[in-house]
Amino acid sequence: MPEPHHRFLRACLSLPTDRVPIWIMRQAGRYLPEYLAVRKQAGDFLSLCKNPELASQVTLQPIDRFGLDAAILFSDILVVPEAMGMGLSFGTGEGPILEHPIRSAGDVDRLIVPDPTRELDYVMQTIRTIRTALADRVPLIGFSGSPWTLATYMVEGGSSKNFSRIKGMLYDRPEVLQALLDRLVSAVTDYLNAQIRHGVQAVQIFDTWGGVLGHDEFLKFSLESMCQIVAGLDRIGPDGARVPVILFAKGCGAHLERMAESGCDVVGLDWTTALGQARVRAAGRVALQGNLDPSVLYASPERIRREVERVLTAYGAHPGHVFNLGHGIAPDCDPQKVAGLVAAVQEFSFGGAHR
Amino acid sequence: MPEPHHRFLRACLSLPTDRVPIWIMRQAGRYLPEYLAVRKQAGDFLSLCKNPELASQVTLQPIDRFGLDAAILFSDILVVPEAMGMGLSFGTGEGPILEHPIRSAGDVDRLIVPDPTRELDYVMQTIRTIRTALADRVPLIGFSGSPWTLATYMVEGGSSKNFSRIKGMLYDRPEVLQALLDRLVSAVTDYLNAQIRHGVQAVQIFDTWGGVLGHDEFLKFSLESMCQIVAGLDRIGPDGARVPVILFAKGCGAHLERMAESGCDVVGLDWTTALGQARVRAAGRVALQGNLDPSVLYASPERIRREVERVLTAYGAHPGHVFNLGHGIAPDCDPQKVAGLVAAVQEFSFGGAHR
């Protein structure tokens, strides 16, 4: 198999690169005025996700503005539960609302495993539109929520503070939760494979809420489902290139070794894990993505530069580092700060023939 | 020095006990109907904190109802910022509001280091009232917020979601944050020493928000301040008994080894850290407190029993375990479930001559 030439894909596969690639979680988003303009045009957030032309436009905006090393499909993790038959809406400022939350085995049985080229065809169209617009400038990342993270929204009926309903289910009716997770494994595997067939060149699984689980519960109810998905993915794209898989689990630095054994190519870390120690713990089994505290972007340009240097130095001159924030960029972030961040990564990691 | 006879104090000092002691963070609180009745009588939450008679009553309620092994002073961590000169109020359902948030070195300079027997004398009166009412049935725990955690409220002006203001300060004007932390170290040290002089028999420092910090930032901006406080505490009470110090930092399992070197007697763990591994990592330097997921209390009585057994088994038959939840008990918890929890701890850890 030929080696990829894009530095993002090379770093994901722990191949040497000219410098450390950078992309930013939620890089197409509300902090960008040009995004807000397109979103207004679309009407609302969900309409924007379902409009391939406009979704493609916002996907490319941060690439055009900042020269990032990868684009990520503009969408939302909750389009999967919607495609499974749950009603989805976004209240103004109140976060997502999923109608008829899952509370019983019967509720799970009623969920369909969607055909991504039918119920989620607008995503596939978006992918094709983006790939055409990108013209191979940078690779396109596809994504999905993890089964556990999707299940939290489906059981709670939306966002949650203490996850009381899904935790109650986990401890009291683990068989119902497991049935839900099993169905999600099928749905997410099909969805990501369809994304790969339609042109995404890497995929990331977001386990936003894995960190609310106890140690053993994370392994059993979150990581296990992610491992099943990883095992079921077509790792070779339609162009014959290898498709790297990134696992990102917020607040799960303690589980790094287990995540590194999941079969993924990259583990994404939040900012609470020391990156240098993480590299030693990963022991070359996976590349690492991260892990600047998104709050550093509230600081001065000079301080941002110093913190970027610190992250790069912590990982050191080894292959397999994808620079990113440790979590999504905040909506109130100043885009100028992001430009400085990207410039700093390009500057400090440039000329690394040793990488 | 004579060994304490209360099993809670013995466990804190890693001495053998007849069984594992249990107390529950936020054990005097809204989940108890008798608490709500007294709070109504007091008027509001802050008035209850400042009424020694009523605060003493609610402190004893969970002891009377459940037979817990320690009482904890009923108060709030934010009475310290209030005593330092910040206005404090609690909006209905909106969390605390601190007037005139700290934004500059000048703001820090204006903060006073309170004399606890003057500005916080109502707390000292409460402690005396509780001790009299307890009549040595169980020991009384005093507490304070950690400097970092108090600083988050003081800089943000209340609760926060992304801690943008204090993170901005941390990265951009660390000297201002450090000055604030230094002042808080003095205030908290004085406050806890006054609590000890007035009769608390152990103290806990709550670092609720240490987990939002990066690895190095936690060590520098949270743990360091806590270490200074621990070093400044009078570890012998007025009765000549040793006063154990508990450090609880939510989301900080990765820092266990460093916390164990802080000079404290006990490290409190949230439920995301595997307790058996934590005991090995603590290597006998400290006792451990925790760490049942509070959400287990949403499960059935039988499941609660099984999870209690699992926590006790994870720690194993070694001295130095204080049973607790991994975080405060939720306001919507059913008190009957708590009774079952306490009974399970008493049952499964009974007869442990081997402990």
Image (tube, coloured by chain):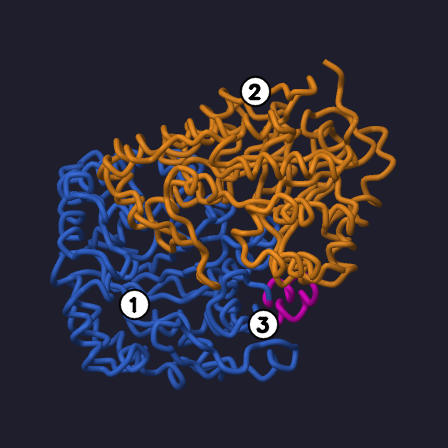
Chain colours: A orange, B blue
Q: CA distance from mark 2 to mark 3?
A: 54 Å
Looking at the rendered structure, the secondary structure element under dot 3 is helix
Who's the residue at 21% across and 74% down the image? Answer: B56
Report which quarter residue A218 is drawn in: top left
Instruction: Name the residue carrying label 3.
Output: B180
| SS class, disc 2 | loop
Marks 2 and 3: which is nearer the front?
Answer: 2
The residues tagged by marks 3 and 1 sit, at their Cα atoms, a distance apart of 27 Å
Q: Where does the C terminus of chain A fall, quadrant-wise? A: top right
**Label placed on residue B55:** none
Viewer-side label of 1, 2: 2
Q: Amino acid at mark 3?
A: Leu
Asked whether the residues under marks 1 and 2 belong to the same chain, the reply is: no
Report whether A226 appears left or right of A70: left
Q: Which residue is mark 2?
A: A234
Dot 1 crowding, Cα within 10 Å, few <14, some 14–19, many 20+: many
| Residues at marks 3 and 1 touching, judged by CB atoms closer than 8 Å | no
Q: Amino acid at mark 2?
A: Asp
Tell me the kind of residue under disc 1: Val
Main secondary structure type of the part rendered in magenta: helix
Q: Residue at x 38, y 78 (%)?
A: B91
Nearer to us in this view, B18 or A204 = A204
Based on the picture, tell me whether residue B176 belongs to the magenta stretch.
Answer: yes
Start and end of the magenta stretch?
B165-179
Residue underneath mark 1 = B200
Secondary structure of residue under mark 1: loop
Sequence-wise, the earlier of marks 3 and 1 is: 3
